[in-house]
């Protein structure tokens, strides 16, 4: 239980998707103009993460790994880890399509406000990145490493933490950009340039948390 | 041959290098541009890998563009890209293992690199194979240039070396110079890229 909690806190603050790994930057910069849409996208990303990371974890440990139960039973223990990229991205694309249909059916207003960014979650690096980091962390020892992911419960903690970290980062940037609209920025630096520098300063602030020993 | 290198095709190739650069103008592929540039060597390898993968995925998608049903095009594109990335990742592991360890998950993340999807959707779905191939080589090199610039500055100021070789003489350190450890941190990559965008825009606005 303690491991579960520290993994959760760690993935929000220390291993923040934006500030320490730069994952999901494209939509982060494109959708952070107003707080409201930023919030919607953040929630959508968290939701997709919560489904894809555990599903990819099961695929990795049960199907792709040569010692996995499904692999042993059906394929007779073959190492299929080279298929990981294709399989992970297929799962992500499929689930994003599913989420899109569900949102369209049950909440047309949210669907309209997210617009094109909902299907684009499929190519959000944060989603794929979380699955790939999860794949690396399976090999770590949970007793010594708080980053380790040992069971399906850990993947939920990791996915939820990463999603909330991403949400915090995008809502924070959106709030700053709303205020920044009234400031006098040098012309060539306006828009993208100053946004990068702002994110850099935010990342520096988040670096204080990297010493957090969990 | 004359037709293959016509004026339009030259523009298709040269535009992404500067005026329509994928990183600083189109804002595509930022994630990896920032994450792999703390040293020059991984930045170069990453730039090359992305160029190769984008060029061939665009070529393949452009050849298939008339047969792909519109509704499932994204999944088809992703599968083509994922297959190419798997091949490149295996080649990197076999020939430059130390760099592939440094790049860690970012090789896999080329699949979700926005340059790929952006150019596939915007260019390869409408244009012939040769134009798409040129466009992507241009975009890949444009991306690599930014990576190399940022990687060069970060490695020089952060570690005092270039491609792993010490370039600052010991006398400079004796005189009190210190490596700026901040440069190897993620935060500085963002600020440096912000400055690159600033310089690029200021230069191009002046020319107009």
Image (spheres, coloured by chain):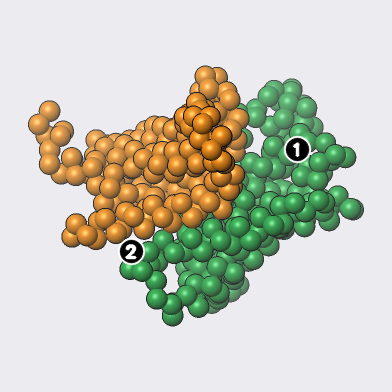
Chain colours: A green, B orange
Residue beneath the point at 26% across and 55% down: B203
Q: Residue furthest front?
A: B175
Name of the residue lying farthest toward the bottom: A182
Left or right, B9 with reference to B160: left
The Cα–Cα distance between marks 1 and 2, rounded to whole angstroms, is 45 Å
Above or below, B151 against A27 in this view is above
Above or below, B203 against B147 in this view is below
Could you tell me if residue B166 is visible in this image? yes
**Residue bearing mark 1:** A138
Front residue of this view, candidates A10 and A188: A188
Residue B109 at least partly seen: no
Q: Is residue B66 left or right of residue A51?
A: left
**Picture quadrant where residue A96 is located:** bottom right
Q: Is residue A114 above or below residue A153?
A: below
Residue B112 in the image, given as x and y percentages of width and height: 50, 46
Q: Residues within 10 Å of mark 2 (few under 14, many from 20)?
A: some
Q: Image point 50% across, 35% down: which residue? A: B172
Q: Residue at x 11, y 34 (%)?
A: B3
SS for dot 1: loop
- The chain that hosts pointer 2 is A
At which x and y percent is residue B35? 54, 44
Between residues A197 and A29, which one lies in front from this camera angle?
Answer: A197
Specify whether A198 is left or right of A4: left
Residue B80, picture quadrant:
top left
Give the x, y percent position of residue B206.
Answer: 22, 60
Q: Residue furthest left?
A: B2
Residue A138 screen position, x and y as percent: 75, 37
- Secondary element type, mark 2: helix
Q: Which residue is mark 2?
A: A188
């Amino acid at each position: 239980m303690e491991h579960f909690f520290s993994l959760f806190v760690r993935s929000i603050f220390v291993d923040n998707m934006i500030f320490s790994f730069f994952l999901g930057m494209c939509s982060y910069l494109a959708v952070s103009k107003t707080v409201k849409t930023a919030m919607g996208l953040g929630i959508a990303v968290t939701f997709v993460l919560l489904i894809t990371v555990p599903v990819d974890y099961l695929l990795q440990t049960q199907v792709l790994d040569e010692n996995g139960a499904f692999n042993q039973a059906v394929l007779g223990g073959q190492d299929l880890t080279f298929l990981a990229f294709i399989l992970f991205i297929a799962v992500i694309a499929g689930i994003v399509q599913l989420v899109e249909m569900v949102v369209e059916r049950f909440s047309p207003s949210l669907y309209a406000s997210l617009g094109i960014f909902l299907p684009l979650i499929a190519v959000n690096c944060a989603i794929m990145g979380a699955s790939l980091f999860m794949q690396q962390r399976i090999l770590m020892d949970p007793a010594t490493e708080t980053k380790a992911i040992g069971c399906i419960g850990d993947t939920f903690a990791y996915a939820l933490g990463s999603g909330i970290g991403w949400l915090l980062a995008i809502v924070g940037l959106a709030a700053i950009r709303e205020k920044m609209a009234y400031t006098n920025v040098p012309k060539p630096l306006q828009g993208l340039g100053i946004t990068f520098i702002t994110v850099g300063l935010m990342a520096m602030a988040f670096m204080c948390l990297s010493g957090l020993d969990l | 041959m004359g037709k293959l290198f016509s004026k339009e095709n030259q523009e298709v190739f040269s535009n992404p290098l500067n005026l329509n650069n994928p990183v600083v103008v189109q804002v595509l592929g930022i994630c990896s541009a920032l994450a792999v540039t703390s040293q020059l060597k991984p930045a170069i390898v990453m730039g090359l890998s992305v160029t190769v993968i984008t060029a061939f995925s665009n070529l393949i998608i452009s050849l298939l563009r008339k047969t792909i049903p519109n509704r499932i095009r994204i999944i088809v594109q992703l599968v083509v890209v994922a297959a190419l990335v798997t091949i490149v990742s295996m080649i990197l592991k076999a020939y430059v293992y130390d760099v592939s360890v440094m790049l860690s998950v970012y090789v896999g993340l080329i699949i979700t690199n926005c340059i790929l999807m952006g150019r596939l959707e915007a260019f390869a779905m409408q244009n012939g194979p040769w134009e798409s191939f040129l466009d992507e080589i241009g975009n890949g090199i444009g991306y690599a240039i930014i990576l190399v610039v940022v990687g060069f500055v970060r490695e020089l100021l952060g570690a005092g070396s270039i491609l792993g070789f010490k370039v600052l003489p010991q006398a400079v350190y004796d005189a009190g110079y210190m490596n700026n450890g901040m440069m190897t941190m993620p935060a500085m990559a963002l600020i440096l890229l912000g400055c690159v965008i600033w310089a690029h825009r200021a230069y191009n606005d002046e020319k107009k």
